[in-house]
Image: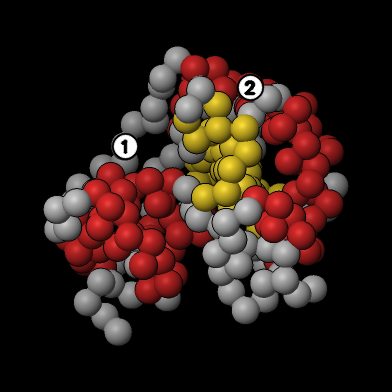
Amino acid sequence: MITEVEDYFTKGCGRCERFDTPDCSTRRWIDDINALRALLLSEGLSEHVKWGHPTYMHADRNVAILGAFREDHRLTFMDGALLDDPEQLLEPAGPNSQHPTLIRFTALGQVAEREDAIMAYVREAMKNAERGLRAPQEKREVELPEELVEALASDPELSEAFDALTPGRRKSWAIQIGSAKQAKTRAARAAKARDKILAGKGALEY
């Protein structure tokens, strides 16, 4: 995965064989992705790269993350469950997600069309970060280790794939990652689990 945020806007995320090719998903949506980036930076959010995606922070908190896929691109709010949604723009990340947290764009030009609404959501998210508010944790079959929760929050594609797993497979990852004694090891296991989770596999499957 990329480690420099500028690479995302010129090459992609670095997580598949389409990286730095005209077929990369970011290439299809780059005009609107750049428009979203400009809006976020105009509000004073700081820009970082996490999990191969541009991530925007305020008050030492992750506020939003950009993502591009074959059929759409997205602006995901880390604590989106706290946001008012007067325009009904927010959608859940996956079929088993309890809270809508992202705005999905399926056609070029939608960022400009929704600019005022997007900025209202961003400003509300920034105020929530300043106040130290956090979205309620979803109730799951087992308690997920903090490092896995952070990985899911930072990676919309991973979150969607994890939600689509069977309860048993989700439990296997909670146990496999959470059994490590050190936080560094748990974080490394969460990162290493990504490809298997995207493939719909549990921790013990090959």
Residue 174 located left or right of residue 110: left
Amino acid type indicated by mark 2 = Arg
Residue 72 visible in this rendered orientation of the protein: no
| Residue denoted by label 2 | 123
Q: Secondary structure at mark 2?
A: helix
Task: Determine contact: label 1, label 2, CB under 8 Å.
Answer: no
**Quadrant housing the C terminus:** bottom left
Q: Is residue 36 visible?
A: yes
Q: What residue do we see at 57% from left, 23% from top?
A: 126
Which quadrant of the structure image shows residue 111? top right
Q: CA distance from mark 1 to mark 2?
A: 22 Å
Q: Which residue is mark 1?
A: 137
Q: Secondary structure at mark 1?
A: loop
Q: Please provide percent x and percent y for residue 22.
A: 79, 73
- Vertical side of 196 occupied by 10: above or below: above
Side (left or right) of 113 relative to 101: right
Q: Quadrant of the N terminus?
A: bottom right
